[in-house]
């Protein structure tokens, strides 16, 4: 059996139709095989189209993994991701071609490489407040940014999930938000009153005029097109750099630090680990358990101040009052200009 036929079935049928994987996961797997197939061709001195499934041996795969580390200088985590892609192909072989069970089992027996996990880079509550306070609300873009930052922390959503939000995912009456996560799975979360008010005000007054193709997208850039996950990453980095020293920034993923901060805040507030798992959209409880290993100091003064912030409404927020005053000032100036 040709290896290329298996790879074709893997990407055309198994991943999207049987497993239901999303485009980002499929793209990551394609990157892995884009590297592995040329390596196998060179290692076996045979054209890619002539490679047989039986040639997919553990020895070949381990050599490929070592090549990734030595020649491409990939870390152990990237190495494990590439191995996971190949082992997913082995699972398909086990399912669709049981007569090749021996080949699949030998591949699945290849162990993942251990590595040192990075420290979870989360924002402390006083840092969150400082970041929010650094936003200039005297523009529609500033209000959008302020809304996104609040939403990232409240929801614990990934940057890609926030970028993919549509208008009808938000229910202002119930203060709920539907988030489309990994694997095409939706999760419904309740928002803080402050976050729900910000979203409602943003939609009604500050959302840019959308380009036709993006009329349903919640968050738009200045050109009316969808705000991408890379745009959200840059947005977060912009405001973090305003209030945090460079040494602190080294430990943080700009957008993901809000997600970690959401989990830590829920942990401090006494939520069970299952609630944190559901809010963050983790597929396995193991991913959520990492937060239990953190040594967290609970500062009561900051905690009380933060609870006041999250439960407040817009008409009780000093920064929103500043924006309203600025809007009134602009109206007066425009009127004077018209005289």
Image: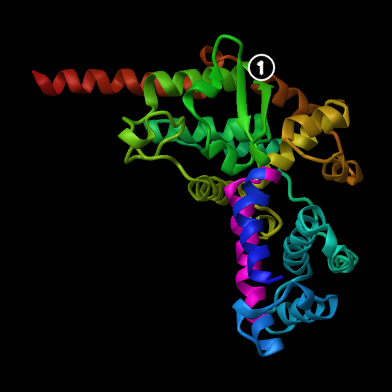
Residue 266 occupies which quadrant of the picture? top right
Q: Is residue 302 magenta?
A: no
Comparing 150 with 328, the one in front is 150
Q: Is residue 124 left or right of residue 149?
A: right
Seen in the image, is 238 located left or right of residue 194?
left
Q: Is residue 88 shown above or below 189?
A: below
Q: Position of residue 79 (x, y in %)?
A: 75, 69
Say whether residue 37 is magenta. yes
Q: Which residues are magenta?
A: 18-39
Q: Residue furthest bottom?
A: 45
- Residue 296 in view (yes/no): no
Which residue bears the numbered disc 1?
311
* Residue 81 x/y as whole percent: 74, 62
Looking at the picture, does residue 197 appear above or below residue 186? above
* Main SS category, magenta section: helix
Rendering colour mode: rainbow
In-front residue for pair 137/156 = 156
- Quadrant location of residue 203? top left
Expressed as whole percent of the image width and height from the top left, the position of residue 135 reads 50, 37
Neighbor class of circle 1 (other Cα within 10 Å; few <14, some 14-19, many 20+) is few
Number of disc labels: 1
Q: Is residue 85 above or below residue 66?
A: above
- Residue at the (56%, 51%) spot, across then down: 241
User: What is the quadrant of residue 102 in the picture?
Assistant: bottom right
Residue for point 68% across, 51% down: 14
């Amino acid at each position: 059996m040709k290896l290329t036929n298996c790879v074709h079935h893997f990407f055309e049928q198994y991943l999207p139709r049987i497993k239901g994987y999303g485009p980002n996961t499929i793209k990551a797997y394609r990157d892995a095989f884009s590297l592995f197939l040329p390596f196998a061709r060179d290692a076996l001195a045979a054209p890619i189209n002539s490679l047989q499934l039986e040639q997919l041996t553990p020895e070949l795969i381990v050599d490929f993994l070592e090549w990734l580390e030595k020649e491409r200088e990939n870390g152990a985590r990237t190495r494990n991701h590439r191995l996971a892609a190949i082992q997913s192909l082995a699972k398909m072989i086990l399912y669709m071609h049981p007569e090749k069970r021996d080949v699949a089992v030998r591949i699945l027996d290849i162990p993942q490489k251990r590595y040192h996990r990075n420290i979870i880079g989360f924002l402390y509550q006083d840092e969150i407040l400082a970041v929010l306070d650094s936003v200039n609300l005297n523009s529609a873009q500033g209000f959008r940014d302020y809304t996104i930052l609040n939403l990232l922390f409240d929801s614990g959503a990934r940057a890609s999930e926030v970028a993919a939000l549509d208008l009808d995912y938000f229910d202002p009456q119930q203060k709920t938000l539907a988030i489309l996560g990994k694997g095409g799975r939706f999760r419904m979360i309740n928002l803080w009153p402050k976050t729900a008010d910000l979203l409602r005000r943003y939609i009604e007054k500050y959302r840019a005029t959308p380009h036709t193709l993006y009329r349903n997208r919640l968050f738009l850039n200045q050109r009316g097109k969808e705000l991408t996950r890379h745009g959200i990453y840059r947005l977060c980095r912009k405001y973090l750099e305003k209030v945090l020293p460079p040494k602190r920034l080294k430990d943080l993923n700009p957008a993901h630090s809000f997600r970690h901060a959401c989990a830590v805040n829920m942990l401090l507030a006494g939520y069970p680990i299952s609630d944190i798992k559901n809010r963050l959209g983790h597929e396995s409880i193991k991913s959520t358990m990492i937060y239990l290993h953190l040594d967290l100091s609970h500062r009561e003064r900051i905690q009380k101040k933060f609870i006041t912030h999250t439960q407040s409404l817009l008409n009780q927020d000093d920064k929103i009052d500043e924006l309203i005053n600025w809007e009134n000032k602009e109206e007066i100036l425009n009127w004077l200009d018209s005289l």
